[in-house]
Every structure is written in C-alpha cells, then in structure tokens.
Amino acid sequence: MSLEQLAPAVRETDYLKRFDRHQYDKAFREYGERFGPLYAEAIRAAGEAGLADLAASLMDELEAGWRRQRIWNRTSVQINEKQMMVAYLSPMLVELEAPLGVAFAKALRDTWSARRPKDGYRIASYEKLASGFRNTILGIDVSGFINRKEQESQEEEEF
C-alpha cells in the first residue's frame, strides 16, 4: 500500500463541505467505503509493531504536500487537513478492525502532536461527532425545544 493512496483521505477536503447534521452521515459512509479498505489493508500489512512508522510516513507525505503549497495557503491547507483527520479519518479508523484501527488512530494523533505540540487534536467516534450537531434557527439553539416537543408527543402517544 503506497502513501499516495492513503494521503487523499486527508487531502481531499471537499468532504468538509458536507460536515453538517444533514449530510455528515452519508458523507462519512461514502468516505469509509472509499478509504476504509485501503487503510485496513495498510494497517494489517504494517502490523501492530509498524503502526508508528506508518503514521510517521503518512505525516511525512502530508508535510511534503504542505511545503509544495504557496506560503499564504499553507496554514489553510493544514487546518483543513487536520479537520479531515478529526471529522473523517479518525472516526473511520475507530470503526475499522479493533484494536489495530484504534491503535493507528492514536499513533497518527501522537505523531501529529509530536510534530505540532501546540496544535494537537482528540479522537472521537462517529457517533460522538454526529450527535454533536445542534438544531438552530437563525443561530438560536432550539434543541431543547425540539426535544421537549418530541417528548410531549411521545407522552401523548403512550396514553
């Protein structure tokens, strides 16, 4: 498995446009179908002992891509790629074959944090991320109101 096949899972930031409560589920499933088998194969090939090296190699590939960017665009690219790791790659890895998927997600996070100590991130599961979207109208959180209405309608149905 080559890094050229693994790196697009972080570099293709068009998925970030679909990171909202309406589109995330479908986008995450498409992402997993596309990149999950590639990462599963790479993780199996690396084995538990080689996960840190695989994470370091992937970071080397990403950093090489950042160096090719124009100076004014580097920070933006890094932010977007980090968001891809948080919102798509890490949750997908958590869902892969346990325990190697989780171990690789941690190795990748630790490699990122070692190289960017002030810019670390946390790993979250798909369920945790998907449950974090708020229901808003004109910027006002109406989650409590919607949940109360749903609860009232369920109570009415029970009687």
Image (tube, rainbow, N blue to C red):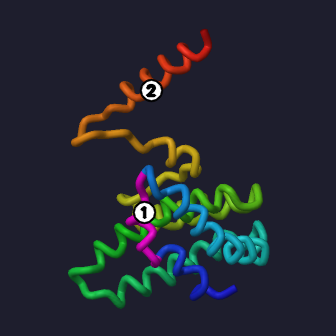
Is-magenta flag for residue 9? no
- The magenta region covers 11-20
Q: Residue at x 54, y 53 (%)?
A: 123
**What is the number of the mark on residue 28?**
none
Camera-nearest residue between 39 and 129:
129
**Image vertical order of residue 61 relative to residue 146, above or below:** below
Q: Secondary structure at mark 1?
A: helix
How far apart are labels 1 and 2 at the CA level? 24 Å
The residue that label 2 is drawn on is: 147
Q: Residue at x 42, y 73 (%)?
A: 13
Camera-nearest residue between 149 and 2: 149
What residue do we see at 26% from left, 80% from top? 73
Q: Residues within 10 Å of mark 2 (few under 14, many from 20)?
A: few
- Which quadrant of the figure has residue 97? bottom right
Indicate which disc, 1 or 2, sits on the residue closer to the N terminus: 1
Q: Is residue 41 above or below residue 82?
A: below
Name the mark nearer the viewer: 1 or 2.
2
Q: Nearer the viewer, residue 26 or 35?
A: 26
Position in image of residue 39 (x %, y %): 67, 73
* Element marked by disc 2: helix
Residue linked to disc 1: 18
Is residue 28 or residue 82 the one in the foreground? Answer: 28
The verdict on residue 15 being magenta is yes
Q: Position of residue 140 (x, y in %)?
A: 25, 36
Q: Is residue 15 above or below residue 129?
A: below
**Quarter of the image where the C terminus is located:** top right
**Magenta residues: mostly which secondary structure?**
helix
Q: Label 1 neighbourhood size at 10 Å, few (<14), some (14-19), many (20+)? A: some
Name the amino acid, label 2.
Asn
Please state if 46 lies on the left or on the right of 75 as rendered: right
Amino acid type assigned to the residue bearing label 1 in the image? Arg
